[in-house]
Image (cartoon, helix red, strand yellow):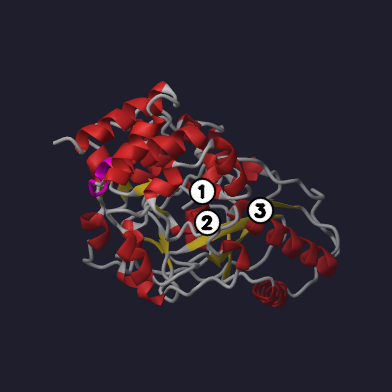
Amino acid sequence: MRVIFNLPEVNVTEPLSTTHSSNKSASSQTDTADWVTLRGEIEAWANELGFDGFGVADTQIEEDSRYLSAWLDEGLQGDMDWMAAHGDKRHKPESLVPGTIRVISVRLNYLNDELETAKALLDHPQKAYISRYALGRDYHKTVRNRLNKLAKRIEERVGQYGYRVFADSAPVLEKALARNAGLGWIGKHTLLINPKQGSLFFLGEIFTDLPLPVTEVFEKHHCGSCTKCIEICPTDAIVAPNKLDARRCISYLTIEYKDSIPLEMRPLIGNRIFGCDDCQLLCPWNRYAEPSREADFAPRHGLDQVDLVELFMWDEATFEERTAGMPLRRAGYELWLRNIAVALGNAKTSDAVIQALQARLDNCSDLVREHIEWALQQHST
């Protein structure tokens, strides 16, 4: 996820916070090092730290930048104004971190249950669907902590060098860099796909001044004629292969969008209260997706199989307590209630659903109340 948006060879992810900057001077102690051997050692260390994929790319992603600019010119980013910010830092790693000549890219799987189990929850008449990446600990911290350990391990080997760690935390076109590092290709749903592990993984990067050899990239886009991701999208947000209209995307509407969800979108959202996985769950390549080895990503508080009515009854203190350290905190309590109200409007009519909605009418914000009133109308026809 992890809110994922668009671009055939481009990814932009939401800025949250910036990791620390290490020593900036490039090491002179490694001038005669066997860089191929060093890259192999770094890959082995990455595997020891639990990463599921490793590669090295250069900093050349100008074509992706042009695609991003065209996408932004169409206004397909919705209210995410930050996607147009930061000047050339997003497509020039050396501008974001001076001295950068290589990007170490890693993958970390997050799948925490069987795909069929997740599929069975889609549009369930009573239960909530939460994007699988968001059920455990906030991935930013997990990925960043491991990358810092990897960077320090490299420093022990080569001495002082320039580097900076990123985990979905800055203006980085991480999918383009991961593609160039040989970790996969960018599929028609705009997500990176690896032929051996699908697309259910997080990405992270180390920008560095070490002249490591780049890894081999996939020469072909291996989606072929398949369009399942486009066809399955509940809101038709994938408007063309590799082109996503964020304004129609359920991940955008339930996480990034802070206003009233458009009326025409509400029935299409179904029971998805935080993000959406449909395009990934139906992607044939995810039959190869491997369960995560990371305990941090295990579902918390039974949120992988929870009733909508139960979640709607959480007060703000309960929300704060149970989403602590989780990606779910990003939406905030008000949007949490807004999203669940929409899902309850799409749920099977029952006394429990109607009573839950009515119980909140006099104790909520105007934004939430408007969505509750809509939901009640769905059960009165």
Q: CA distance from mark 1 to mark 2?
A: 6 Å
In the image, what residue type sits under mark 3? Answer: Lys
For disc 1, the marked residue is 173
Residue neighbourhood size for the residue with mark 3, other residues' Cα within 10 Å, grouped as few (<14), some (14–19), many (≥20): some
Are the two marked residues, 2 and 3, in contact with CB atoms closer than 8 angstroms? Answer: no
Look at discs 2 and 3 and give the one toward the viewer. Answer: 3
Q: Is residue 326 above or below residue 116?
A: above
- Look at the image and say whether residue 348 sits in the magenta stretch: yes
Measured from the top left, where is residue 247 in percent x and y? 32, 36
For disc 3, the marked residue is 141
Q: Nearer the viewer, residue 200 or 297?
A: 297
Q: Is residue 41 above or below residue 146?
A: below
- At 48% from the left and 45% from the top, the residue drawn is 12
**Helix, strand or loop under label 2:** helix
Measured from the top left, where is residue 32 in percent x and y? 80, 70
For disc 2, the marked residue is 177
Q: Is residue 244 left or right of residue 131?
A: left
Q: Is residue 174 above or below residue 224?
A: above
Residue range in magenta is 345-349
